[in-house]
Amino acid sequence: MKEQLKIGWFEKNTKWLLLLPTIFILLALTIYPLIYSVIAMLHTVNIRTGERTFVGPGNFIRMAKDPFFWNALKNTAIYTCSAVSVEFVIGLSLAMFLTTKITGRNVFRSLILAPMMLPPIVVALIFKIIYIPDFGIINWFLALFGIKGIIWEASADTALISLILVDVWEWTPFMFLILLAGLQAIPLDPYEAAEVDGATGFQIFRDITFPMLRPAVLIALLLRIMDTLRIFDQIFIMTGGGPANATETMSIYIYRHGFRFTNIGYATAMSFIMLIITIVISNLFIKRLKIEEVF
Amino acid sequence: MLKSFFKYFFMVIITMFVFFPIVWLVSTSFKNPVDMFAVPPIFVPANPSFDHYATLFFEAGIVKYILNSVIVAVSTTLLSLVAGTLAAYSLARFRLPYRMNERLSFWVLSTRMFPPIVTIIPLFAMMRFFHLLNTRMGLVIAYTAFNLPFVVWMMRGFFMEIPEELEEAAMVDGDSRMSAFRRIILPIAKPGLVATSIFTLILSWNEFLFALILSQTRSAATLPIGVASTVTQYEIKWGEMSAAGVIAVVRVLIFAFVVQKHLVRGMSFGAIKG
Amino acid sequence: MNKLVKYLLVALMLLGLTVSVFAGGGQEEKVEEKGKLVLATLNSVEGQTTKKALLAFAELKGIEVEIVEAPYSNLFEKQVLDMSQGTGLYDIVLLDDPWFTQYAENGWLTDLGPFFEKKGESGLSDDFIPTSAAISHYPYKTGKVYAIPFFGNAQMFFYRADLFAKYGLNRAPKTWDETYAVMKKIYDSEEGVYGYVLRGQQGNPVVAQFMPVFWSFGGRMFSDDKSKVQIDTPEALNALNFFLKLKDISPPGAESFNAQQLATHMLQGTAATTINWPAFVPAFEDPKQSKIVGKIGYAPIPSGTVTGSSEIGHWIAAVPAGSKNKELAFDFIHWATSAEKQKEHAKAMGTPPTRLSVFTDPELVKMDEFKHYPILKDCIANSTPRPRIANWNEVENTFGIYLSMAVAGKISPKEALSKAQAEVEKLMKKAGYMK
């Protein structure tokens, strides 16, 4: 009798029990940080005494007047836009190329996924070695074609581009993977119909492939944008934000304030802005996706 | 004929572009200091040196880092896969009140939007409170939190692809809901489970920022920390640095190639449905 | 019928348990244990030296030790996190002297006075060079002693004596004018040799490189009572203009160079002069790494409008206030900075000492690799410390960004200085130094 009751309870609540661990872990690790951040960003800590005082919106006012903050925001925007769009174009072309029938494409597919598996730290070190201006391999190679004197991440003019190239190398495969999966999910019938109608390749792409690929495109862009907005590892190792602040992104700048200048309040205030930016951008995409398509 | 020649040519070029940096890393890790920056560059060192690896294993104690990385990555994957799969199943199959299916799913996904730098400061305070700093446990918990949304999201997609009739048929035959889940659904969702666990493993193996902040001693420091610490103030130890890089990469690459076919299939199965 | 749910829950708990057992393996057991020392140190040659010293000390005393080595780029963060959050993990910290004011002012360090008294000493020995001792006291020079100077870094002017002789200067250069004339000649006429190699990386490096030039043109970043910022001044402008002239004769990429690139260029013989730390001297005099053995001269910083002065950049050892083994930790740093040990370290690792008696040790001065000791000793004795302010890190970062922009040619020197002035003033107001 008792046993039966117990089973009944389990049965009734299976759906909640299954959800419990996930909800618990996520709550514990998001709610507390959120509360902490909200409190911290309204305070400032005196660097000389460690004393904490309430400043209200003070940290946000400071942000508005802080040229380095705007610079970090600008760099993050440039980095995100250029890296993601280049990755998208290359990734899409590769994915389309590899849906055409050709022997050995499976091997090739798995080969070009390699970069995204590597730890970003290692990728940063690889390119540090490759980019060395005087003795580096890439400058030796370019010199064969008469191109000389590029100093890559060491110059304020080329540093950001050099880092974007690293990102493109590492993450285009990811873009490719999702788009390829999306292409493979498209049924064949519309193509057959189009061929019967005598549509050109471009028309087929515009009218069939692209619309059907839309969810995959949106998801790929969304994930990559979320990741590039928070870019930290490569920059931390390769340039640390320099030269001339040319590669300082939001994450690097927040890290600097939070851990180096011990301005926890200011750092959390900036983190909060960053979180809002991420959520706003993500929502733009998710709205377009319609929730049923994601889940 | 010519067309497919061009295709292969193109594939070879792309592959070279992808692999050149990795090959260069491996080659650098076996070079003597004299060969390191030789002009013209040396691709295959004539007398390879194992010094850098020896230094890492016998002096720098890289074994400790490797061990930490393995334990953290495997534990994280197990934990987030079990918890996430259960939650995903519930979200995919049961009708929850108050439109909770959509709302919870959205909330779970939205935690993935938290950039790590946003949570790291409070997380440090929290870990200190629970005495989890410098423990692998602390890292496992943190990594599980940022892997869960991904697992839930992927696995939910998989489960929704699988027709509900399969379970219903099993339940008519006398199975309970959960034994139907175990007997029927899990085997079908295997490609998804594999793809998801690959991603989880890779993410937790590669993570840097949390490991940097949450481990102040070597007791829980993972491989990326070990790799980063080869950059010293007065010199960059190019040889040791690349050797450490190779060590960090080898495991991931082997693993990824063994299971790669599940990756494309898994992705097309779950996350994206047109 | 719902066995499986229960199985799953049990499995999950078991899993959680195994994870915690496994993962808990990394837990620090240190807290309760008596007689274990944890050292947070750098991962370069100074760090190696402290590591070896601590291991020797551990053997001597029969204690357990743990050594945490971190790159320069995040050693400071590690130490501050530990001390400010009260984790109390580290017993000994090796710190760069400009960090010292913040540590001491926040009460993160142990007053070493009582421990010296127990040993029957009144404080730091007179054997330490006075400028080295001064930076270990808070407030500067006059206050209590919170640290012991471990490694005597101060900048020196490195020059290729052979090339200077070739272009008509047969002695150590004294003023920037005469030095620059020779450097320019070398740059113009010597194939593949740059006149100077500038350390221009944003942040600590470029500021450390600029300071001695700044001082030699009579500049000071702050007034003595720190109530005025003196960055946008004629002296600073002169200094920055000259600094950019040095950049013009430096190898490309100088705006991202740190100490290691400077050393590489000197070792390869592709640069004629530089300002750098003495840590590189052993490499310069080592035929296995260096193409310039015996060709290099060491000199104090040349004079501009006033006498040149090196920047002091000591590594000093301190005991965090949260340490549970203060006495033992003090014993170690006291032991490891003795004259005998410093000499040992110099011979084994080439690290610079902080004691006069080691600088003048008859055995050492006879050796080739220590021929720079008399110069280095004078450089330290006449050195200038970076401003003793608690928010130096942030001030340095801000100033460094504008210097870096000027070096990269992004903005004019005048604009760099006036912007730096404005931003540094904000920081000084925020920290309460300025009204």
Image: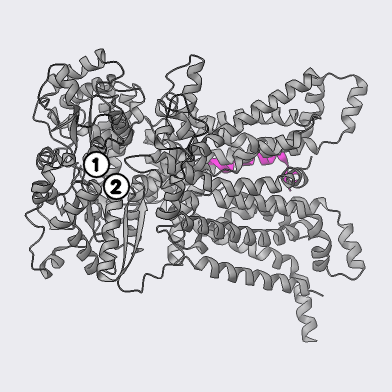
Vertically, is C83 above or below C391? below
Is A282 magenta? The answer is yes
Give the position of the C terminus of chain C as an image quadrant.
Answer: top left
Would residue C256 appear left or right of A24 to someone viewing this image? Answer: left
Q: Nearer the viewer, residue B151 or C365?
A: C365
Q: Secondary structure at mark 2?
A: helix
Residue C319 quadrant:
bottom left
Residue C79, quarter of the rendered image:
bottom left
- The residue wearing badge 2 is C45
What is the number of callouts on the image?
Answer: 2
The residue most toward the bottom is A1
Predominant SS of the magenta segment? helix
Q: Check the residue under mark 2 and report the chain it is in.
A: C
Compare residues B155 and C63 and report the one nearer the observer: C63
Residue C171, position as x, y percentages in the image: 9, 25
Q: Which mark is residue C279?
A: 1
Q: Position of residue A198 (x, y in %)?
A: 90, 19
Which residue corresponds to the image point at 27% horizontal and 52% vertical from the top-left? C49
Q: Chain of mark 1?
A: C
- Asked whether residue A264 is drawn in magenta, I would say no
* Residue interval drawn in magenta: A277-295
